[in-house]
Amino acid sequence: MLHAEIEISSFLKARRGALDPAELGLPGGVGRRRVRGLRREEVAQLAGISVDYYTRIEQGRAPAISDSVLDAIARALRLSGGEVTYLRNIAVPRRRPADCVAPGPDGGPCTVPRQTVRPEIQRLLDAMETTVPAMVLGRGLDILAWNALGGRIAFDLPALAPDRRNTALLVFLDPAARALHPDWEAKAVEVVGNLRAESGRHPEDPRICEVVNELLAHSRDFRRIWETQSVHECLRGTKSLLHPHVGELVLTFESFRLSTDPDQALVTYTAERGSRTEERLRELGAVGHPVLTA
């Protein structure tokens, strides 16, 4: 479990530590402060609440926080839209996931069925397989399904055990990831931002907790980036991949939440018309080069 009091404490401390008091018109520059960023009393003043109440919120000791107070804190800390959503998610009382079917042994974490992709979605993936690499991501960035071309632009997904088909685990623990992503650091920051957003939506989901805890235990880079408390859900953009057989692929990706399966997202990758990447995708689709392995 990602404990609520730990999450909200770390998040609020990181966010107030990232602010420059001078930019907010507050007295006392960095040189006169023992720590970077805003003091608790300054956040409380900007939010219009008492210092004692803000302190209890930051320490995870406030049992119920109203939306208006959360909004005031968000404004005081200059939170982005994704960060506001994350704050709301971790500030509410802990609840079991909606699809929790039974408590675990001795009343521990609940058992959640492994996510599956509807046959209609798999048919959609397969219909695009000769021109558009595509896959479906589930909770915790698990890769639930893909088409043939989607499996050829990156890792050998069919060869992996189901619990290893996870974007975060592959990026941080698979040695092939650093060769695949020319700007690995940017990709790592993107993945952590997405995973933290996921943990905010489902703070007690056993799979998300399993992924986060494994990465905290086995990747110093993940720990370093996770501790920055960055929350940024990247749903679209352009990425460059260095495929070992066809060379550089410059792809635009888009993520679409499935309306009937909101915890799943269809991710598609496309190339600019007439580009070298488009030619290389056709080559991958026709020949079926081996995929990356660790």
Image (cartoon, helix red, strand yellow):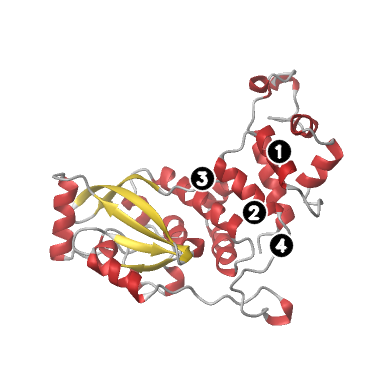
Q: Choose mark 3 or mark 1, whichever is in front.
A: 1
**What amino acid type should be assigned to the residue bearing mark 1?**
Ile
For the residues bearing labels 3 and 2, Cβ distance under 8 angstroms: no
Q: Quadrant of the C terminus?
A: bottom left
Please state the horizontal and vertical placement of residue 50, each as a whole percent of the image. Answer: 84, 36
Residue 228 in view here: no
Say whether disc 3 or disc 1 marks the residue closer to the N-terminus: 1
| Mark 1 residue element | helix
246 vs 39, nearest the viewer: 39
Mark toward the viewer: 3 or 2: 2
Q: Position of residue 144 (x, y in %)?
A: 40, 69
Label 1: how many Cα within 10 Å (few below 14, some 14–19, many 20+): many
Q: CA distance from mark 4 to mark 1?
A: 20 Å
Q: Secondary structure at mark 2?
A: helix
Residue at left 25%, top 51%? 270
Labelled pair 1, 2 in contact (Cβ < 8 Å)? no
Which badge, 1 or 2, is on the more N-terminal residue? 1
The residue that disc 4 covers is 94
The residue that disc 1 covers is 73
**86 lies left or right of 39:** left
Determine the secondary structure under disc 3.
Answer: loop
Counting residues from the start of the chain, the first of labels 3 and 2 encountered is 2
Q: SS for tag 4?
A: loop
Residue labelled with disc 3: 232
Amino acid type assigned to the residue bearing label 2 in the image: Asn
- Can you tell which quarter of the image residue 153 is in? bottom left
Residue identifier under label 2: 89
Residue 286 in sight: yes
* Disc with the residue nearer the chain's start (4 vs 1): 1
* Vertical side of 203 occupied by 206: above or below: below
Label 4 Cα neighbours within 10 Å, binned few <14 / some 14-19 / many ≥20: few
